Every structure is written in structure tokens, then in C-alpha cells.
Amino acid sequence: MTTIQLQGVGKRKAIKASELKPGMKILWNFGYSSLVVEIIPSKTGKTLTLVTESNGKSYSRKTTPDRLFAVS
């Protein structure tokens, strides 16, 4: 099992961005969380755009498929 250290939270289970699915909850530093709404791969496959929702607002973030994200 892969883990990562979050500030103010401690060690949490982590998965690669390529393994994320809509409906999963991503954990951030200091206990914040976001709900994954959509995952959009680039044409080349080198990046993913994650559309997340937190506190009623929608955010998009580009990342590599190998980046680790803490999940609950």
C-alpha cells in the first residue's frame, strides 16, 4: 500500500492520478477534501485534467498520470 504524508493530517493511503475515478474524494493538506467530478485525458496521454468540486465551487487542475493523491 502506498502512502503519502499530508501536513496537519499525517500519513494517508494514496493512489496514482490515472487510477482516480469520478466520485472519489481527494484529501489535501490540513484536512481539506475535494470530490472528483470528471477526469479528462490529454490527446497525448501525458497529462490529465481533474475537475473537482469543493465547497460548491468547481476547480480544474492539470497533473501527470503518475502523481500520487491521498484518497479517503
Image (cartoon, rainbow, N blue to C red):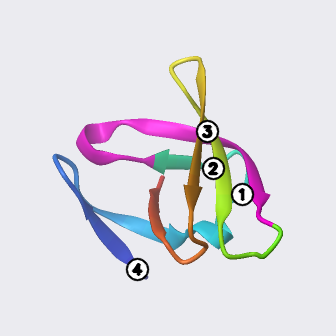
Q: Of marks 2 and 4, which one's residue comes earlier in the chain?
A: 4
Q: Which residue is mark 2?
A: 24
Q: Which residues are magenta?
A: 27-42
> Which amino acid type corresponds to the residue marked 2 in the rendered image?
Met
Q: Badge 1: few (under 14), some or many (20 or more) residues near its Cα, within 10 Å?
A: some
Depth check, front residue: 41 or 38: 41
Relative to 51, is 54 on the left or the right? left
| Distance of label 4 from label 1 (alpha carbons) | 17 Å
Does the CB distance between marks 1 and 2 fall below 8 Å? yes
Q: Badge 3: few (under 14), some or many (20 or more) residues near its Cα, within 10 Å?
A: many
Relative to 67, is 9 on the left or the right? left
> Which amino acid type corresponds to the residue marked 1 in the rendered image?
Lys
| Distance of label 3 from label 4 (alpha carbons) | 22 Å
Q: Quadrant of the N terminus?
A: bottom left
- Which residue shows up at 35% across the image and 73% down it? 3
- Which residue shows up at 54% across the image and 78% down it? 66
Q: Quadrant of residue 37?
A: top right
Which residue, as the protein is rendered here, is positioned at the far right?
Answer: 43
Q: Which residue is mark 1?
A: 21
Q: Of marks 2 and 3, which one's residue comes earlier in the chain?
A: 2
